[in-house]
Image (spheres, grey):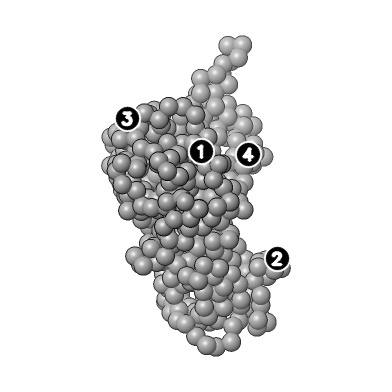
């Protein structure tokens, strides 16, 4: 396709090096992009799902999608068209390049049977106009270990026979990957996404190239009394001393657990390591257990609280039928979609046994844009609150309260991974 003499197309192998350099420019990287880095990145890219805008020989905008599995309330997963690597060079803004690339990619995703689209939004205002809404948030904490009140002499697992063992990269690629698949299928882990074999290689040093961002890390595995792996923590530390006293910061890169017991034990372990005075938690769910595990919860101070995973429906019936519902109820949703992909009026009949969603001509109970449904879908937001904000219109009294009963979840959604 052409627009203002710009050629927007799926890439060829010859296009790819220029595309990578344009991506680096868009993300304000000024260092050299080597041939080794280009080769390393190429292995994770499907060129049919990778688009660029070209002004002559120069690539001036980048866009890519990848297949993804997104865990939804109840533990099932759905196919998502995950959007990533979005840039437009500063010299070519306001020419509709992102709109063109997004429009084509979402239409292709729907045709492939992907029921939603997901992305990590670098900036808040960009994606609402494309029907996305913030669906999962994160919080990072900085823990003052000295103030936390934990007894470092009692840092081992609570369960008799359980243990925490140091693990190497190769072991984590096997045990960690298997654990992650179990964890993301739990009924209250909505928002988690699948991790590919390439993800594990990149994050354990089996695949390293300039620009990959990998740094060596420590790993520990939590095993229960039966020897089954129930938790993983990956972390790094900075070696900082002042006046012959340690002021070491520990940075949690990854912490996943299949049981609350394993999660508690891993945090106690991290907070008991010699020389560590500050623990930086990395991205956690906003309702993470950590602060309330501490005798002094104020020792965990919030560094960042922000939106992270954004979602937009592509197939509303399939999306709503995939998740679980805690109570029974029926709602007619009138959805407005600025891109014409997922709008319409739908009847949702839901119960703890399952759900059915079909197009309908019945009068609407709630009216909203698809971005509002996105914010409700994983259970994080309240329809009553969105109504107060003017993002949801209640056409039938009591419908927003019913939507809250149907859609909200006991635990907040969480996506720990960038993509």
**Residue carrying label 3:** 36
The answer to whether residue 82 is left or right of residue 171 is right
Q: Position of residue 104 (x, y in %)?
A: 43, 61
**Residue carrying label 4:** 303
In terms of depth relative to the viewer, which is nearer, 70 or 131? Answer: 131
What is the CA distance from the residue labelled 1 to the residue labelled 4? 23 Å
Q: In which quadrant will I find the N terminus?
A: bottom left
Other residues around mark 4 within 10 Å, as few (<14) / some (14–19) / many (≥20): few
Camera-side mark, 3 or 4: 3
Asked whether the residues under the numbered discs 2 and 3 touch, taking CB atoms below 8 Å apart as contact, a structural biologist would say: no
Residue 206 visible here? yes
Rendered residue at 37%/50% (across/down): 50
Q: Is residue 245 above or below residue 192?
A: above
Rendered residue at 54%/50% (across/down): 121
Q: Which mark is residue 324?
A: none
**Residue carrying label 1:** 27
Q: Position of residue 234 (x, y in %)?
A: 42, 36
What is the CA distance from the residue labelled 2 to the residue labelled 1? 33 Å
Asked whether the residues under the numbered discs 3 and 4 touch, taking CB atoms below 8 Å apart as contact, a structural biologist would say: no
Residue 80 falls in image quadrant: bottom left
In terms of depth relative to the viewer, which is nearer, 273 or 60? Answer: 60
Q: Position of residue 371 (x, y in %)?
A: 56, 64
Other residues around mark 3 within 10 Å, as few (<14) / some (14–19) / many (≥20): few
What is the CA distance from the residue labelled 3 to the residue labelled 4? 36 Å
């Amino acid at each position: 396709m052409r627009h203002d003499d710009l050629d927007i197309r799926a890439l060829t192998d010859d296009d790819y090096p220029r595309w990578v350099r344009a991506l680096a420019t868009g993300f304000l990287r000024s260092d050299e992009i080597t041939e080794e880095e280009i080769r390393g990145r190429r292995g994770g890219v499907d060129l049919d799902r990778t688009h660029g805008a070209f002004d002559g020989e120069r690539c001036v905008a980048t866009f890519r999608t990848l297949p993804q599995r997104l865990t939804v309330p109840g533990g099932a997963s759905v196919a998502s068209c995950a959007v990533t690597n979005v840039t437009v060079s500063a010299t070519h803004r306001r020419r509709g390049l992102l709109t063109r690339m997004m429009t084509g990619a979402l239409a292709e995703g729907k045709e492939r049977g992907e029921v939603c689209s997901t992305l990590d939004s670098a900036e808040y205002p960009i994606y609402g106009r494309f029907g996305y809404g913030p669906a999962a948030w994160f919080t990072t904490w900085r823990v003052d270990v000295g103030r936390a009140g934990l007894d470092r002499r009692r840092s081992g697992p609570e369960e008799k026979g359980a243990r925490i063992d140091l693990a190497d990269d190769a072991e984590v690629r096997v045990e960690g990957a298997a654990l992650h698949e179990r964890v993301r299928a739990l009924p209250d882990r909505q928002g988690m996404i699948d991790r590919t074999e390439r993800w594990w290689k990149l994050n354990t040093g089996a695949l390293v190239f300039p620009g990959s961002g990998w740094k060596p890390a420590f790993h520990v595995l939590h095993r229960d009394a039966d020897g089954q792996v129930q938790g993983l923590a990956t972390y790094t530390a900075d070696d900082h001393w002042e006046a012959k006293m340690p002021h070491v910061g520990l940075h949690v890169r990854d912490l996943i657990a299949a049981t609350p017991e394993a999660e508690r034990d891993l945090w106690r372990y991290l907070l008991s390591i010699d020389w560590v005075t500050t623990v930086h938690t990395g991205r956690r769910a906003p309702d993470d257990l950590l602060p309330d595990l501490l005798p002094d919860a104020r020792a965990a101070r919030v560094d960042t609280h922000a939106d992270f995973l954004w979602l937009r429906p592509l197939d509303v019936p399939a999306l709503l039928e995939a998740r679980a519902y805690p109570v029974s109820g029926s709602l007619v949703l009138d959805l407005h979609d600025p891109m014409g992909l997922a709008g319409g009026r739908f009847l949702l009949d839901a119960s703890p046994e399952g759900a059915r969603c079909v197009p309908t001509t019945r009068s609407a109970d709630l009216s909203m844009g698809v971005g509002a449904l996105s914010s409700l879908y994983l259970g994080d937001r309240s329809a009553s609150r969105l109504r107060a904000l003017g993002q949801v219109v209640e056409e039938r009294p009591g419908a927003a309260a019913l939507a809250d009963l149907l859609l909200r979840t006991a635990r907040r959604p969480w996506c720990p991974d960038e993509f």
